[in-house]
Image (cartoon, helix red, strand yellow):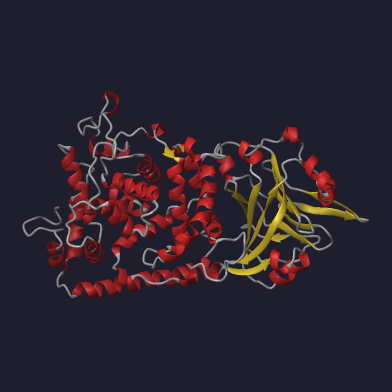
Amino acid sequence: MGQNASVQQDHAEIGHEKRQFTSNSELMEFFDKRAVHMFTATELAAFKSKLEGKTLKDPVRSEELTRWLRIPCENVLLCEAVYEFVRVLSNFPLMKDSFDDVTGVGLLKSVLLTNPSKCHKYVGVKNYDHMKLLFIALSMRKSVKEEPSCSSSTSLEDGGGSINLLRTYNNIVVDDLAIPATSLVQLLAWLLILTSYCPTSNCQFPEDVVYAEWGSFKLAATNLLRTMNNNIVTNLESYSVKFEQFSKAISTVMPNIFRALQNVMEHLLYQDSDLVSFPSNSAGPILTSKPTTQAVLAQLITALSNEMTFAKFQNLYVGRESGFSMRSLQAKVFKWMAPTVMLLSGKCVLDDEDFSKKNSRYRDFLSKYPKLKDRDQHLSDLQKNKTKVVFAVYIPEPWKTTNKDYFGGSGTTIVQLSPTQDVFKAASNEVMYFNTLGGGIGIGNNQPHIKNGVKSYSPGNVSLTIDSTLEFAAFRHVGYGGTFNPGLLLTQFNREDDPFEIKFLIQDVEVWGCGGKEELEEQYKKWQWEEAEAKRRQNINLRSFGEDRALLEMAGLVGHSQNGGSM
């Protein structure tokens, strides 16, 4: 019988819903066996080649794992965090009770459990919370064994059997767990690097290049960390992240942050010779500007990956090079007939009165901008103390001059990238103007009132106002009622009506073309074709070994006298 038929037969036999397990070791053996049967013969053969003669039951050392995942060994904190993460998953489903080291089969389980769709199929429990599983794996440390308590029994005889054990995550109290900020920022920086350089499960990973940019990726990761816990201003050692903070931040404003982890874990299922190069994910010549680093783009992708692709990302306008003027921006950008991203970075004005005394142009801007009163604002300590701010605006339609009407489309999105990340989505179609009569650029605003040389801005409830000299900007958030909705993360924490305003001196303005829907679909099709081609090559290589099942027996995955795939 071929391996595929054997797997189908075994899948029909290994459902755990009605099965009774008499011990934890029997349950663990069952899930080890179940994991092996979820991979094809070609994937198992590629994985087995990395073990260099070891069996699936043999331990995998930390240095081996980090080498396979392309993590630099000198980053000790990241190596330890990733190994502990995999170790917790490799002990699934007894994540609290089992303290075994990572093994080959445990690593296969980790590959499944980092992939949401495969995880749900493997676990076999409806409504299983994949994000909670990832949080547990990131927050637990298997190097210290917990003493069992009467209140946290993990017996299979507690009335719920294996289903209850899975639904309770081995009776782990998630609210008691936290991820240290020092290790989480390292992991987030790594995930951003993977987002840039590991867009698929079968792409080459140029580790000799990417880690040279670690500093900028860590800065971007700190923004994501503060998004989870905005009490963090400095001194990460004093802080941690709880599950509610972790879950709400990821589900709302960085839903794609773990997609790249899934990709790099699935690299283990390919021979190195079958990995392909993707020039679209290299740093290349396009990322030469000061504010738009590869790390910033990766951070933006975590929020907007369904709208953006690195493949068609093109530099259109850089204020530092072409001059900070609307005329220059118009000349460079208006011919691009596809979506764009405008990036604004600057220095926050923390004291209007003091800065107005030093800068007469800012005083003139304030005279035209109806600012919020200080007593009405709800600014966090982070907003009060951090002077660096970065906003990006995704615009799905071509730019055009609109001195009376508007453009932009319902897909227009404002993304705050620093000092924290949040996403503000358009609530209507006409949401943006480019006013050449002195009104500047407004996103979420009404057209400014300009008459007889007198000008006044009309900011919306959620809006970004940019003056006509591209020198000053103001972001306003006062809740629902405008053409943009309140921040997704603010809404999650019931702060959608909290009013605040961020005014800043613009230091950089850039516009990047990022391709349209057709380009994005074309890129996805190419990636899918490359992945299918890699699997085809692996199948050809596998046939040189003979029958699939014979290979599995040789690899120690299937015994001659065993039924289907016992370990």
Visible residue check, residue 91: yes
Picture residue at 44% right of the left edge, 54% below the top: 191
Looking at the image, which residue is at 55% across and 67% down? Answer: 517
Q: Work out whether residue 124 can be spotted.
A: no
Residue 469 picture location, percent across and down: 79, 59
Q: Position of residue 314 (x, y in %)?
A: 59, 70
Vertical placement of residue 28 versus 321, above or below? above
Where residue 150 appears, x then y in whole percent?
Answer: 26, 24
Q: Residue at x 17, y 62 (%)?
A: 53
Between 16 and 83, the one lying in front of the other is: 83
The picture quadrant where one finds residue 554 is bottom left
Q: Could you say which quadrant of the image residue 378 lies in?
A: top right
Which residue is drawn at the image coordinates 52% and 70% (left, top)?
284
Q: Which residue, as the protein is rendered here, is positioned at the far left? A: 561
Q: Looking at the picture, tell me which residue is in the foreground, 477 or 213.
A: 213
Residue nearest the observer in this picture, 452 or 77: 77
